[in-house]
Image (tube, rainbow, N blue to C red):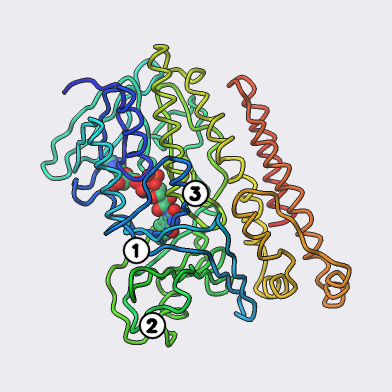
Amino acid sequence: MERFDVVIVGAGTGGCTAAKTAASAGLNVCLIDCKSEREIGNKVCGDAIGRHHFDTLGLKYPSGDELERKILGVKVYSPDTHSIFRVVGEGLHGFIVNRHSFGQRLLKEALDANVTLIDNTFVSKPIINGGFVRGVEAINVKSGEKIRVESEAVIDASGMSAAIRSKLPPESGIETNVDKTDLIACYREIRRLKSELEDGDFCRIYLNLEVAPGGYYWIFPERGEKVNVGLGVIATPESPNPKRQLYKYVLSSPLFEDSILIHKGGGLVPTRRPLSSIVWNGVIFIGDAACHVNPIHGGGMGPSMIGGRIAGETLTEAMEKGDLGVESLWNANVRYMSSYGAKQAGLDVFRIFLQGLDNEDLNYGMKYRLLREEDVLHVSMGEDVKLNITEATRRVFVGFGKLPLLKKLIKMVSISREVKSLYKDYPKEPRDFPSWKEKVKQIFENAKRSIG
Ligand SMILES: Cc1cc2nc3c(=O)[nH]c(=O)nc-3n(C[C@H](O)[C@H](O)[C@H](O)COP(=O)(O)OP(=O)(O)OC[C@H]3O[C@@H](n4cnc5c(N)ncnc54)[C@H](O)[C@@H]3O)c2cc1C
């Protein structure tokens, strides 16, 4: 088989974007996926994506078959459902996409840029030569034939399976495992209701830590009477089964009476700060394989494409220099952290705080608007958390014995700011990385102890 400049493992949103970027810059790119060409893009997902990602990446907005619904905002429900935050604003305009059609579009754009696709092929491990990743070993899932695909460099865009990252040697210093407390296990269905959802321009998110411990459940409107309904829980052994919870608490409600099941499935989402480094010699990780997901709402399509663009461009520059070592690829780290990673890391502190609350805290917090609706919007767009604690609120919270909650909230805001500025100040050179990583470790250990 010919030798490629770049092998990309996984033709999801991240991999297709990386492939198109690198191939459009003239690199000889091979894209490998275990799915068949026609099945690529068919992934269990909430299907929601912000319009701003399309603007940032210069992507055409979804239309026709690809577009299920345009979205104007999000409604967030408190556990007792007495408080509803209706969060609207340009920043939350978005789309519910038909995930399969959207994935097929991204694949077509990559193939149109001259990418070679090897489908039905499962990548088992990296080829490592002289301390550099130089291709992959794989197996055809239909014929069982084993193949080696050699290249100058590899991009791991294989999603949660992290086919390359998880198999790197210890001397790479790369985090090969992700802690279960940083994963959300989800189950979701697409259903047709008897009638169209009211307020159908809004995604609905329900916070309830007894029904969905560490996560939430959602109802997102799709085309006509169709909805995307799912539930996610923290992926620790003590957590309940998300499918059982969805059936018991959500699908049993009158809204779903006589609804028709169209599609079902589950999956894991890494809802944490990004991996502290996404590069090693001859390799870059992106998307879920690099924990590039918004820790609060679990949206990962947009950041995976941002990572894909950055990886494709970084490899192109490195190939021009003829140097694919860590130092040469380091810019991918710097660029990701400044474009999305710092926001993600700040929100990870918020996620740790939210997971440490109980339903009563959430009910009080939302009832007394400790965060205002417009501030929720700003936070979701990456701005610092701004609290709305008046003297009257303080008195109410003291009266209810909830002063510790207020103190924790204030502490969370200050840790979140500290983390964000640390990530914005990401080391420009690998030699400054160990001390930066140690600081991050300490801040997050402190966060888990004091606000989690
Ligand atoms: C239930 C659920 C709901 C979600 N809701 C949303 C949402 O509403 N909005 C949002 O933006 N994000 C959502 N996400 C997250 C989002 O789906 C992911 O973050 C995003 O798809 C990541 O893109 P990716 O390219 O990194 O990986 P993926 O899209 O997972 O693509 C990985 C590709 O690699 C292939 N692959 C894997 N292993 C191998 C291997 N060993 N060899 C060859 N090929 C391999 C797979 O077949 C796949 O095509 C949700 C996730 C889940 C599970």
Nearest to viewer (mark 2 / mark 3): 3
Q: Which residue is mark 2?
A: 256
Spatial distance from mark 1 to mark 2, Cα to Cα? 19 Å
Say which label, 1 or 2, has the lower sequence index: 1
The reply to whether dot 1 and dot 2 touch (C-beta < 8 Å) is no
Helix, strand or loop under label 3: helix
Three-letter residue code for mark 3: His
The reply to whether dot 3 and dot 1 touch (C-beta < 8 Å) is no
Three-letter residue code for mark 1: Glu
Give coordinates of residue 63: x percent, y percent.
32, 56
Say which label, 2 or 3, has the lower sequence index: 3
As displayed, is residue 361 above or below residue 234?
below
Name, please, the residue furthest toward the left: 143
Q: Which residue is mark 1?
A: 68
Total numbered badges shown on the rendered structure? 3
Q: Which residue is mark 3?
A: 52
Q: The C terminus is located in which quarter? A: bottom right
As displayed, is residue 215 above or below residue 224?
above
